[in-house]
Every structure is written in C-alpha cells, then in structure tokens.
Image: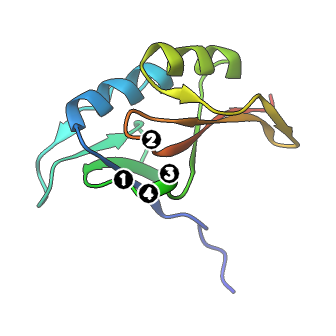
Amino acid sequence: MADRAIMVWGEIPVTDIDKSAAFYNEVFGYTSKIDNSGPNPMVVLGPSEANAGAHLYPGKPAPDSGNTIHLGLTDTLEAGMERCKKAGGEVVSPPITIPAGRFAYAKDLDGNSIGLFEATK
C-alpha cells in the first residue's frame, strides 16, 4: 500500500451554516467564512490546504451523532472545552490522555460528534 493520507477531508452537516461557522470559529480559533463558489455553500475549517481538512455544509446531521472528527486546538484542552460550552456546544467526556496528546468528546450545535484535541508538545 502506498503512503497516503488516511483522511482526505471531513464533511460536517449543519442546519444553520452561519451559526455553525461562528461556533467552530469561536471554539477552534478559526477565521473561516462561507464560500459560495461551489454547488453548495461551505465553510472550510482552518487555513491550511497542506493537511487533511474539513468543512461545514448545509445538510442533515446523522442520528446519534454519526462519525467523530477530531479537530486540533491551538491552546489547552480545558480552554477549548470551556469555549465549546460557552458557544452552545456540549462536552460529553472528561479529558482523555493518549500518547499523541489529550482530547475530549463534544457535540456541536447540531449534535454532531467532534473531538477537541490538544497535541503533546
């Protein structure tokens, strides 16, 4: 098998793209805006095209939270958890430590399952 990215990109379905863009910008420190250049509006999360990415799009979230996409924080896990709650999301686990760092499971405004991830420095 050739070396290649495991995840090419992730798509997160949301019911209100404006509110969801504000939520993800607040929690993860993005400055993402709505992009109407394609067949559907979308909000690309984060500034880099060099890594696997993710975007929001108008859609129907999966029942029971669907898949989980883990997104990197720029500061501490605790700060990200607090921003998530303040922005209207729900943190559904305590911090979990793994060799690569720490994360917590959360739900966005539509109940999508997301991971808040703080990498080991």
The outermost residue toward the right is 99
Distance from label 4 to label 2 (Cα)?
9 Å
**Residue at label 1?**
61
Q: Amino acid at mark 4?
A: Pro
Could one spot residue 30 in this view of the protein?
yes
Front one among 77 and 67? 67
| N-terminal-most mark, 2 or 1 | 1
Q: As drawn, is 43 to the left or to the right of 113?
A: left
Q: Are marks 2 and 3 in contact (CB under 8 Å)?
A: yes
Q: Are marks 4 and 1 in contact (CB under 8 Å)?
A: yes
Name the spot of residue 53 as percent of width and height, x first.
45, 51
Q: Are marks 1 and 3 in contact (CB under 8 Å)?
A: yes
| N-terminal-most mark, 2 or 3 | 3
Q: How is the image coloured?
A: rainbow
**Residue at label 2?**
111
Q: Amino acid at mark 2?
A: Gly
Front one among 70 and 120? 70
Q: Are marks 2 and 1 in contact (CB under 8 Å)?
A: yes
| N-terminal-most mark, 4 or 2 | 4
